[in-house]
Amino acid sequence: MDLTPATTTTRYIELDVLRAVALIGVCVMNYHGYLVLEGAKYPPTNFIERIFDPWDGPLSTRFAATFVTVAGMGITLLTRRSRASGDGRALSADRWTLIRRGVLLYAFGFFLNWVWSGTILFFYGAFFVAGAMLFRLRSRWLVAIGTGAALAAAGIKWWALDRQNNGHDTSWLLDGEAVVTRSPRDLLLDTFVRGTHPLLPWLVFLCVGMVLGRLMPFSGRRRTELAIAGAACLALGYLAHDFAGLHPILASTSPLDRGVFYTLATVGSSLLAVSLIGWVAEVTSQSLVTRSLASAGRTTLTLYVGHVLVYNLLVHWLEWLRPGALGTALLFAGIYWLCAVVAATAYQRRFGIGPLEWVYRRFSSHE
């Protein structure tokens, strides 16, 4: 899932670290959510548990959204040379590279969803295909498309629930799953509307990342501006949720409601992450911790699939781990990621690229 060109410059180490930190958060929230479904303590009863609530807490989907934002930045960096040259053959080669990678992840994610429901890989593939169609557009058009995706998602959810409240059946739009029905219609609706990370509104996070990639490398002033913009979006999203007086769906900050203020607040948290984590990665680029995280960030596809396999091995097959309180999920995720970072660093020193990354690039290359 690493689209960044091979390089050792600080700004690309920054993206690797961002990718690693985002995936660590995804792992924590996934483990907690799945353990809750297995019977762990829920609903939350204290402040920390509310923070880590996998469905309605302030961290819910934030890490995944940042991961998609970083993917958008990677798309921009991958296509920077062809866009600058305007060469038709180079542009076509980059477009088909993105499409092949997207289709591969989309297909793999579809089957992975049978054992890990809600996997982001399925949607990640769709984001790459969308990126292939969008990477040549000017930044203002990317902003307009992202904004349109956010408004469309809120409007569709509002319309469906309004129809439902008036006695009409909208289960075809709100329910169902393609891996169960094997229906092309459900596959399309899962991808665009009702999945865990659908293009509406998640396309906005990809578009934000594509615009950010065009601003790299970030100056100190640019990082400050991004942090201020992120904090403003985050604050406005939550304040508007409380005081705007809009329809509950439109004003909701719950991920499943696809509300405009949820999207606004999540864009804010992603901007803050890009600015602050990127700055830390830049100033500590030679430290062991940063370089180890960068190694993990370049191996995210392998580590993501690994966290699925480890969970099923320890919880379902060996039954060594039982659902418990939040601490169980945090400890589980922490141990996995400590081992994963060490393993990724050692593996890359010996082989240079993760095993699934090698397959991913081998089968999506245009050469």
Image (cartoon, rainbow, N blue to C red):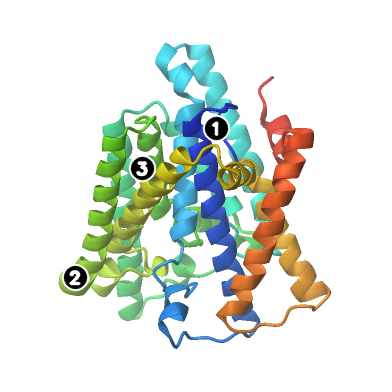
Horizontal placement of 301 versus 120: left or right? right
In the rendered picture of this protein, how many numbered marks are placed on residues? 3
Q: CA distance from mark 2 to mark 3?
A: 25 Å
| First along the sequence among labels 1 and 2 | 1
Would you say residue 180 is visible in this rendering?
no
Frontmost of labels 1 and 2 is 1
Query: What residue appears at the point 82 percent right and 73 percent down from the top-left corner?
Result: 317
In front: 236, or 281? 281
Above-or-below relation of 33 to 120? below
- Pick the front one: 337 or 269: 337
Q: Position of residue 21 (x, y in %)?
A: 53, 53
Q: Is residue 319 above or below residue 279?
A: below
Q: CA distance from mark 1 to mark 2?
A: 41 Å
Amino acid type at mark 2: Leu
Q: Amino acid at mark 1?
A: Thr
Whole-percent x, y for residue 69 in the image: 44, 45
Residue at mark 2:
246
Question: Residue 118 occupies which quadrant of the picture?
Answer: bottom right
Q: Which residue is label 3 attached to?
A: 208
Q: Secondary structure at mark 1?
A: loop
Looking at the rendered image, the quarter that the N terminus falls into is top right
| Crowd class of label 2 (few under 14; some 14 to 19; many from 20; radius 10 Å) | few
Of the residues under marks 2 and 3, which one precedes in the sequence?
3
Residue ID at (40%, 81%): 47
Task: Tell me the quarter of the image containing the C terminus.
Answer: top right
Residue 4 circle label? 1
Dot 3, how many residues are within 10 Å of its Cα: few (below 14), some (14-19), or many (20+)?
Answer: many
